[in-house]
Amino acid sequence: MLEDSLDLMKLKKQLQTLLEDKLDSELLDKLPSGYSIIGDIAIFRHINPELTEYKQDIGETVIYLDPQVNVVVEQFSTDSAYRKPQIIHLAGEKRTITKHKEYDTIFNIDVSRITFSPGNKGERGFLIDTIEDNEVIVDMFACIGNLSLPVLVNKPSIQCYGIEINKEAFNFLTRNIEENRVKNRYFPILGDNMNKTPKGVATRVLMGYFGIEETQFYKAQEAIEEKGWIHYHDLVERGNLEYTRKKLESLAKNVNLNIQIKKTRKVKKFSPRLIHVCFDIFVNN
Ligand SMILES: C[S@@+](CC[C@H](N)C(=O)[O-])C[C@H]1O[C@@H](n2cnc3c(N)ncnc32)[C@H](O)[C@@H]1O
């Protein structure tokens, strides 16, 4: 993936060199400097609207430059509860389904229907390194196994209950569970975590979704058998961590939970204003 600053510079420069006969200098300056890759699909976000008529050229140039890429799309913001991305095709094969590999885990995914953030790779690594043998995870927002599946693939004694409300994401989840051969330890549950979260089974609960409700927080605590961890994700305004910490503490207080926020971790930069942060919360029932 073209993700470090050197590569980002390289992409913009390479695009500028290869498209200099087509674009004037003002437009050359507005060329994008990066994209993410899921499987063999390159995903641009927010290409400058002034470049609209050159998007296909940009896509074709990326396929020429990057041997890993067979499809190029542009993604717009995802704001529904089901988090379905808005995708337009720019170049290459006309498909949105691909097979993405990370931490020896295979993710079958349709990038036009389901969100998968390559920027959460560090968080997936953190979970693999942190979760201890024989733990039981409840992944309340499982999607296609984004956070929990790599843990099961890399740690053979761990079990997981993954709850997913979106049927399409759930179908990919069950397919990924089979393809990664963890069917005997990963128990997928189709439905709303408000009423499908198992009680008293977990040592660890993953809440990988922004803007959760009090009831969901309560369900997370109920999922923990005796004591354990809730990994709660949120978007935090730059320099305003204390505000989110207080919000979280009052959320817990409203449902009579005794929580201890032990650590906060930056997962990724979300936008110029917002940071994606994970709060590691210890719960003792
Ligand atoms: C943004 S994705 C996050 C996936 C993953 N946790 C991650 O951090 O990469 C959120 C997923 O939660 C699911 N979801 C949202 N509300 C839910 C609910 N009440 N019960 C179960 N799943 C839910 C959505 O369908 C979506 O697949």
Image: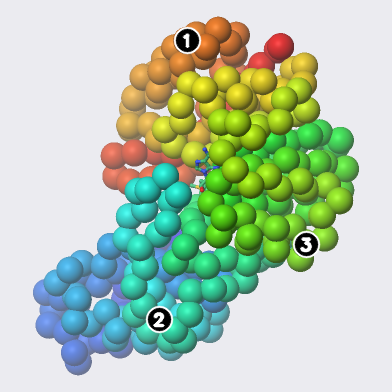
Q: Residues within 10 Å of mark 2 (few under 14, many from 20)?
A: many
On the question of residue 54 being in view, the answer is: yes
The percent coordinates of residue 142 (x first, y second) are 61, 46
Of the pair 255 and 126, the residue shown nearer to us? 255
User: 242 or 56, which lies in front?
Assistant: 56
Dot 3 surroundings within 10 Å: few (below 14), some, or many (20 or more)?
Answer: few
Is 44 in front, or is 136? 136
How is the structure coloured here? Answer: rainbow
- Residue indicated by mark 2: 62
Question: Callout 1 environment at 10 Å: few (<14), some (14 to 19), or many (20+)?
Answer: few
The answer to whether residue 3 is above or below residue 121 is below
Q: Nearer the viewer, mark 2 or mark 1?
A: 1
The residue lying toward the viewer, choosing from 18 and 55, is: 55
Q: Secondary structure at mark 2?
A: helix
The residue under the point 52% across, 67% down is 110
> Which residue is depicted at the point 19% across and 92% down?
21
Q: Which residue was labeled with disc 1?
A: 254
In-image side of 149 versus 114 (left or right): right
CA separation in Å, label 2 and label 3: 33 Å
Read off the residue under disc 3: 178
